[in-house]
Amino acid sequence: MIGSCPPLDPNSAYCNLLQCTHFADCCVLAEQDGQIGGWVSGYRPPSEPDALFIWQVAVAPQARGRGLAGEMINRILARFPPGSITHVITTITADNPASWALFEGLARQWSTPLTRSAMFDRDTHFAGAHATEWLARIGPLPR
């Protein structure tokens, strides 16, 4: 699924298997008519256990434009007791308008702010080989 959804970074199958076993509560797979329609993987950072970090969001081309990505993230959040997750965080490059639209839309849906700050700088962290990853932080979430 991830390989068919550029510009997502393709990870090894092993990494994806670890995500969906070690962090199963923070991952969701959407199926439609026996086909994979979408995948969201995430985790709760040990240094910030009241946050949900969204690692990757992939929606198959035939399932796009229907709100599936937001629905999958909401389903993950629904697995946790109210108030136990106060923020949703992710990183996004500046040249990824689809991801910005998704997370800005979630902030509007939840009536809470989205803040942006540089997390991993193009030159400092990636030696110019990858665009700056901006931390998008949504919250506090409604209870």
Image (tube, helix red, strand yellow):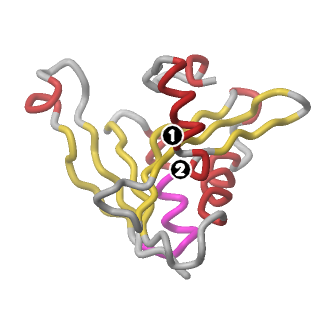
Residue denoted by label 2:
102
- Disc number for residue 98: 1
At 45% from the left and 40% from the top, the residue drawn is: 97
Residue 30 x, y percent position in the rendering: 75, 40
Whether 106 is among the magenta residues is yes
Q: Give the camera-side residue of 51 and 32.
A: 51
Q: Tell me the SS state at disc 2.
A: helix
Q: Closest to the observer: 47 or 70?
A: 47
Examine the image and state in which quarter residue 125 appears: top left
Q: Position of residue 101 (x, y in %)?
A: 50, 49
For the residues bearing labels 1 and 2, Cβ distance under 8 angstroms:
yes
Start and end of the magenta stretch? Answer: 103-112
Q: Amino acid at mark 2?
A: Leu
Name which quarter of the figure residue 5 lies in. top right
Looking at the picture, how far across and down is residue 55, in whole percent?
45, 41
76 sits to left or right of 34: left
Local crowd at mark 1 within 10 Å, few (<14), some, or many (≥20)? few
Tell me the distance, in whole angstroms, between the alpha carbons under discs 1 and 2.
6 Å
Q: Is residue 133 left or right of residue 39?
A: left
